[in-house]
Image (tube, grey):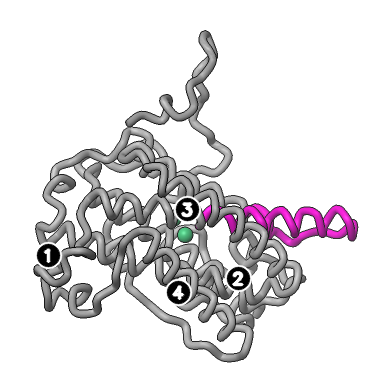
Amino acid sequence: MNIKEYFPPPENFPAIKKSEAWPHPVYTEEQMRQIVIAHRKTNNWSDWVALKSVQVLRSVTDFATGYRHDKEVAAGIKDSRDANRKRFAMDERKWLVRFLFLESVAGVPGMVGGMLRHLHSLRRMKRDNGWIETLLEEAYNERMHLLTFLKMAEPGWFMRLMVLGAQGVFFNGFFLAYLISPRTCHRFVGYLEEEAVITYTRAINDLDTGKLPRWENLEAPAFAVKYWDMPEGHRKIRDLLLYIRADEAKHREVNHTLGNLSQQDPNPYVAEYKDPNIPRPSKGLTTLKPTGWERDEVLR
Ligand SMILES: [Fe+2]
Ligand SMILES: [Fe+2]
């Protein structure tokens, strides 16, 4: 399956150069290996609403992608290919379907948030304090995840229908929710990304325990090698999943942090701080905080 088949360019159409609008930050292997599953406790009603919404969305996704989370399987105590679990055993194809669905949804919030803040800035004739670019960058990064997986699998009609429905419902729902409470929406994305880290961690475990033999020696698509600047000798599917999981962990941190801020606060991910000795949020993985930075930590 090749991307060109999806979007055939007109004849004699010049090739598009690699986009340099949002170069991907460099991650080291050590940093990526240290990514952990994490959960931020709910502190108020808004957090609770965000968490419950993610849990509902997660059930829909599990249904759409034929996935069932089994704690014993995730912990490696039981094999997902046992006879009574067979229906929900994940193979390469099923993982890809799940990734495609997840990523098609994941690309929506950053674009909606960025768009609404853009419109707000135009309408109120006020500066945005740097949030827009981080939100759009996140949407771009999620789309790169989707395009990478599209290089590996072609979704069937059922999946396309689910994506279509999900986008129609989710875009509008998120748009309205962001107008009402942007903080709840960022918390929601923070919780969504907690789930994304769990999904990719589990896929990496499946790969490591020999359940995904077709991926063991498979090279990552050239497109991905370019985007993440994957070093030679580290261009397998496992490496790709490490990069993507690290991106999700970053989104988890960014959104939990934005959910802790007031809407007029400067975006700490693009702010220039005077004191270099105090640890601050960064674009890469150097100062990653799985549950986000608190407001007093970034405004002091
Ligand atoms: Fe993603
Ligand atoms: Fe993400």
- Which quadrant of the figure contains the N terminus? top left
Amino acid marked by disc 3: Met
Task: Kindly identify which numbered label has been placed on residue 162.
Answer: 3
Q: CA distance from mark 1 to mark 4?
A: 35 Å
295 in relation to 265, above or below: below
Dot 2 falls on a residue whose secondary structure is: helix
Task: Kindly identify which numbered label has been placed on residue 289.
Answer: 4
- Residue drawn at x 25%, y 48% is 93
Q: Is mark 3 within 8 Å of ligand 1?
A: no
Reading the image, the residue beneath label 2 is: 186
Q: Nearer the viewer, mark 3 or mark 2?
A: 3
70 in relation to 139, above or below: below
Q: Nearer the viewer, mark 1 or mark 3?
A: 3
Q: CA distance from mark 2 to mark 1?
A: 37 Å
- Which quadrant of the figure contains the C terminus? bottom right
Q: CA distance from mark 3 to mark 2?
A: 24 Å
Reading the image, the residue beneath label 1 is: 81
The magenta stretch is 106-134
Q: Residue furthest top?
A: 12
List x then y, in percent, for residue 191. 49, 74
Q: Are marks 2 and 4 in contact (CB under 8 Å)?
A: no
- Residue drawn at x 43%, y 61% is 248
- Residue drawn at x 68%, y 55% is 114
Dot 4 falls on a residue whose secondary structure is: loop
Residue 21 in the figure: left or right of residue 119: left
Q: Which quadrant of the figure has residue 30?
A: bottom left
Q: Is residue 254 magenta?
A: no
Q: Earlier in the sequence, mark 2 or mark 1?
A: 1
Q: Nearer the viewer, mark 2 or mark 1?
A: 1
